[in-house]
Image (tube, grey):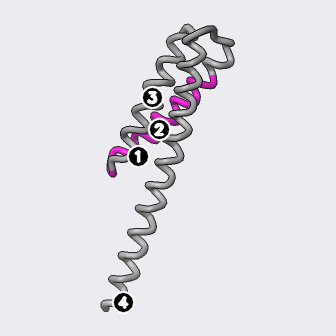
C-alpha cells in the first residue's frame, strides 16, 4: 500500500468517525473507524510523505483523534444517563 493510499484511508476514516460520532447507535462503529484513521495516519507519516500526502496524513490523524475524543465523551454521557435513569427508577419502588 502506498503512502498516498494510507493517507487517503486515514482521512476518510477520520472524517467518518467525526460525522458518525454524533449519531447515537452508529457512534460505536465509527469509534473503530476513528482508531483505524489514527493508525493509518501514523503509518503514512512514518513513510515520510511529501506534499499533499503529508497534509492528508496529518488531517486524517487529527480527525481520528478528535473522533475518538467525541466518541468517548458520547459514551460517557450515555452511561451517565443510564445511571441517572436507573437511580430515578429505583426511587420509585
Check whether the beta carbons of the residues at disc 2 and disc 3 lie within 8 A of each other. Answer: no
Q: Alpha-carbon distance for marks 2 and 1?
A: 7 Å
Q: Residue at x 45, y 56 (%)?
A: 75
Q: Residues within 10 Å of mark 3 (few under 14, many from 20)?
A: many
Residue on which disc 2 sits: 32
N-term mark: 1 or 4 = 1
Residue 91: in magenta span: no
N-term mark: 2 or 3 = 3
Image coordinates of residue 43 in percent, x first then y, are 62, 21
Q: Residue at x 45, y 34 (%)?
A: 33
N-term mark: 3 or 1 = 3
Check whether the beta carbons of the residues at disc 2 and disc 1 lie within 8 A of each other. Answer: yes
Look at the numbered disc 1 and give the secondary structure of its residue.
helix
Q: Nearer the viewer, mark 3 or mark 1?
A: 3
Quadrant containing the N terminus in the rendered view: top right
Q: Nearer the viewer, mark 2 or mark 3?
A: 3
Residue on which disc 1 sits: 28
Q: Residue at x 38, y 77 (%)?
A: 86
Quadrant containing the C terminus in the rendered view: bottom left
Residue 36: in magenta span: yes
Residue on which disc 3 sits: 13
Task: Classify residue 88 as left or right of residue 55.
Answer: left
Height in image: 50 above or below 21? above
N-term mark: 2 or 4 = 2
> Residues in magenta?
24-42
Task: Classify residue 1 as left or right of residue 30.
Answer: right
Q: Alpha-carbon distance for marks 2 and 4?
A: 37 Å
Q: Nearer the viewer, mark 4 or mark 3?
A: 3
Q: Alpha-carbon distance for marks 4 and 3?
A: 43 Å
Look at the numbered disc 2 and give the secondary structure of its residue.
helix
Amino acid at each position: 500500500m502506498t503512502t498516498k493510499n494510507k493517507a487517503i484511508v486515514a482521512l476518510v476514516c477520520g472524517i467518518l468517525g467525526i460525522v458518525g460520532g454524533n449519531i447515537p447507535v452508529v457512534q460505536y462503529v465509527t469509534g473503530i473507524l476513528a482508531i483505524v484513521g489514527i493508525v493509518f495516519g501514523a503509518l503514512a507519516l512514518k513513510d515520510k510523505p511529501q506534499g499533499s500526502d503529508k497534509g492528508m496524513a496529518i488531517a486524517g490523524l487529527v480527525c481520528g483523534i478528535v473522533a475518538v475524543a467525541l466518541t468517548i465523551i458520547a459514551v460517557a454521557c450515555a452511561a451517565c444517563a443510564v445511571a441517572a435513569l436507573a437511580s430515578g427508577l429505583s426511587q420509585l419502588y
